[in-house]
Amino acid sequence: MKPVSPALSMHLDPAGIALEGGKGLAKQLCLALRQRILATPATYRIKLPTSRNLALALNVSRNTVVRAYEQLYAEGYISSRVGDGTYADGLAAAAAPDLAATAAAVPAMQQSTMQQRLSGYGVRQRRFDGPARAFRLGVPAYDLFPSAIWARLQSNFWRHAPLAHMGYGEAAGNLRLRELVAAYLRHARGLVCEPSQIMITAGAQHGIALCAQLLLDAGDKVAIENPCYPSAAAALKVAGAQLVGIALDQDGMDTAQLAQHTDCRIAYVTPSHQYPVGVTLSLARRLELLAWAERHDSWIIEDDYDGEYRYDGTPLAPLAALDHSARVLYVGTFSKIAFPGLRLGYLVLPAKLVPALSALRAMSDRHPPAADQVVMAEFIAAGHFQRHIRRMRRASRSRRDALMAAWAPLFGAQLPLPKVAAGLHLSLPLVSLQQEAELVAKAIAVGVEINPMSRFCLSGQPVNPQHRAGLALGFAGVDEIAIHKALRLLQQAWHDL
Ligand SMILES: Cc1ncc(COP(=O)(O)O)c(C=O)c1O
């Protein structure tokens, strides 16, 4: 039989309402996989991804995948071989009627290393269109984006200046925008850099992926916070990294644990607001991390994805501002102040990396779209950006307050919330994975998006026991009324808490 990898581009509905009259995620996954197996010709054998990889690819909990696999196993659709994974024999009699299955029927022999690395991830088909829902992670109050101003600036661009920007531009991005970003970082973060060190990217994720592609060889070790931002972990792994999870405490990444690792090419960190735990890397730890990088000749990727959102206390200087040996690659984004669909962000690079990274960039998408860059530059230069930051910070603070105030009388005794001094989300610890799975499943069943903390943990890597199980809630994506509505739904769903 020919071995194949299954096409993983399936859509699961977290609310469980779109499919078959409202089935749970495990049931939906089981149905989708069963359909794939039935549609795959009998001459093919499907190697299923590990439960961990499939859970990551579909953005569901590992428990969900394990339950789906158990059901298929009980029904005789799949079998497992110790040490060699899980298999299903195709069951379709003739040529596959399912085009997706046919496309996936690529003999494993023909797969490149990159294809193999990507096979566990599949295509993420999360439904992120339409308005955000409570308590979605990673989204700001984009309902407040000043679309009328943006539309006016776009129309100005097309009326007055397009010819100068309609040819090919610089790989690093529009110079005026880079100058304005440099001025903004100097003023807002105390990060002094030249516009020539800045590269405009298609968001932070693109920046992280570019850095990983440039700096990693296959098998290189990368130190990463555990729990961590899964898409950064994925970009690093796909670039060949072997991830080394470092546990966290209330001061951020445990640099004593990091010090035991002397052969990491990169450390990836979210110092201003750790994702997803929410702690801030202390100044002492920042200095230790920089000293570690210098000692072991390593790079640091500093992901400052939501640094604009600080509500209490003074923000600490970014690592890039404290770096005296040009080792920090600073990642910033407009996603959390403007809106994620904009796909604009930036890197601040050590000068010596600029030529190679510009070359890498030019070979892929050449440079970011000209109109959006020019309009963003005008948006910043005319003062709209700073005004909008203040507005977004105010709105997010108010949404945070609404969540915390309404949560306390409902669940505060059993599930106390931590103090939240920064960012767009919060996380709280739970006593067990079982409690986590129950609370998340019940929330999802009533249409409230809550993420399990275990989704962000790297399996088999050191983690603070407090971070093994928990809940992560984004509070900024919806207004106070929607927050209250979601909490009422949770009150019903969790009535037996
Ligand atoms: C920690 C972290 N880094 C990076 C990103 C990616 O942001 P962008 O939309 O700019 O790619 C996110 C998005 O949620 C994030 O949470």
Image: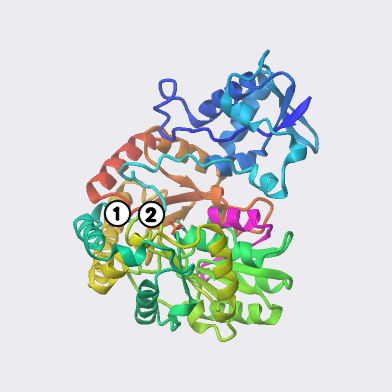
Q: How many numbered circles does the render carry? A: 2
Q: Where residue 98 sits in the image (x, y, percent)?
A: 58, 22
Q: Is residue 461 left or right of residue 151?
A: right
Q: CA distance from mark 2 to mark 1?
A: 8 Å
- Specify the label residue 340 is tagged with: 2
Question: Which quadrant: the C terminus?
Answer: top left
To which quarter of the image does residue 202 belong? bottom left
* 411 up-or-down from 404: above or below: above
Secondary structure under tag 1 reads helix
From where the camera sits, is residue 481 visible? yes
Please state which amino acid type lies under the numbered disc 1: Tyr
Residue 157 colored magenta?
no
Question: Where residue 108 sits in the image (x, y, percent)?
Answer: 74, 37
Q: Position of residue 207 (x, y in %)?
A: 51, 63
Is 234 magenta? The answer is yes
Closest to the observer, 427 or 117: 117
Query: In the rendered image, is residue 228 in sight?
Result: no
Do labels 2 and 1 touch, CB within 8 Å? yes
Q: Quadrant of the N terminus?
A: top right
Q: Which residues are magenta?
A: 231-251
x then y, percent, for residue 419 = 38, 63
With 275 as the anchor, is 133 left or right in this view? Answer: left
- Residue lying farthest to the top in this orientation: 93
Q: Is residue 249 above or below residue 60?
A: below
Amino acid found under the numbered disc labelled 2? Pro
Q: Which residue is mark 1?
A: 142
Label 2 C-beta lies within 8 Å of the nearest ligand 1 atom: yes
**Mark found first going from the N terminus, 2 or 1:** 1
Is residue 258 or residue 160 the one in the foreground?
160
